[in-house]
Amino acid sequence: MITAVEPKVEAAGRYSVAQASEALGIHRNTLRNYTEQGLIKCGFRRQTARKFYLGSEILKFWRAQL
């Protein structure tokens, strides 16, 4: 269940999978599933090929779940 409290993230900030899932109050696998379903967008860091989530996307996703 996604947190009822708006995540405290900076709109322009970049957040790791762990940070984004913690901000939303969900497990990282749940976040992965939502990403695969196209419900939330992520980016990739070229050097490490790790996913990141923009704060604006986290907030947009959270607000859509209300």
Image (spheres, rainbow, N blue to C red):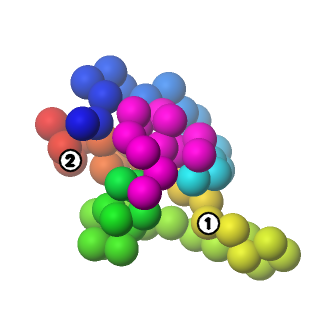
Label 2: state its secondary structure: helix
Left or right of residue 37: residue 40: right
The amino acid on which the numbered mark 2 sits, given as a three-letter code, is Ala
Quadrant location of the N terminus in the rendered image: top left
Q: In the rendering, at what x and y percent does residue 25 appear?
A: 39, 33
Q: CA distance from mark 1 to mark 2?
A: 21 Å
Q: Is residue 16 visible?
A: yes
Instruction: State left or right for residue 32 relative to residue 63.
Output: right
Q: Is residue 47 left or right of residue 27?
A: right
* The residue stretch that appears in magenta: 18-29
Predominant SS along the magenta part:
helix
Residue 32 image position (x, y, % from top left) = 42, 63
Which callout, 1 or 2, points at the residue further toward the start of the chain? 1
Q: Which residue is mark 2?
A: 64
Taking the magenta stretch, the answer to whether it contains residue 48 is no
Is residue 12 in sight in this rendering? no
Mark 1 residue type: Lys
Q: Is residue 20 magenta?
A: yes
* Quadrant (top left/top right/bottom left/bottom right) for the C terminus: top left
Given the current orientation, which residue lies at the most extreme left position? Answer: 66
The mark found on residue 51 in the picture is 1
- Local secondary structure at mark 1: strand
Which residue appears at 31% of the width and 28% of the height? 3
Q: Name the one closer to the observer, 57 or 15.
A: 15
| Mark 1 Cα shell of 10 Å, populated few (<14), some (14-19), many (≥20) | some
Few, some or many residues within 10 Å of mark 2 (<14, 14–19, 20+): few
Of residue 22 and residue 62, the one placed in the foreground of this image is 22
Rendered position, 12 above or below 47? above
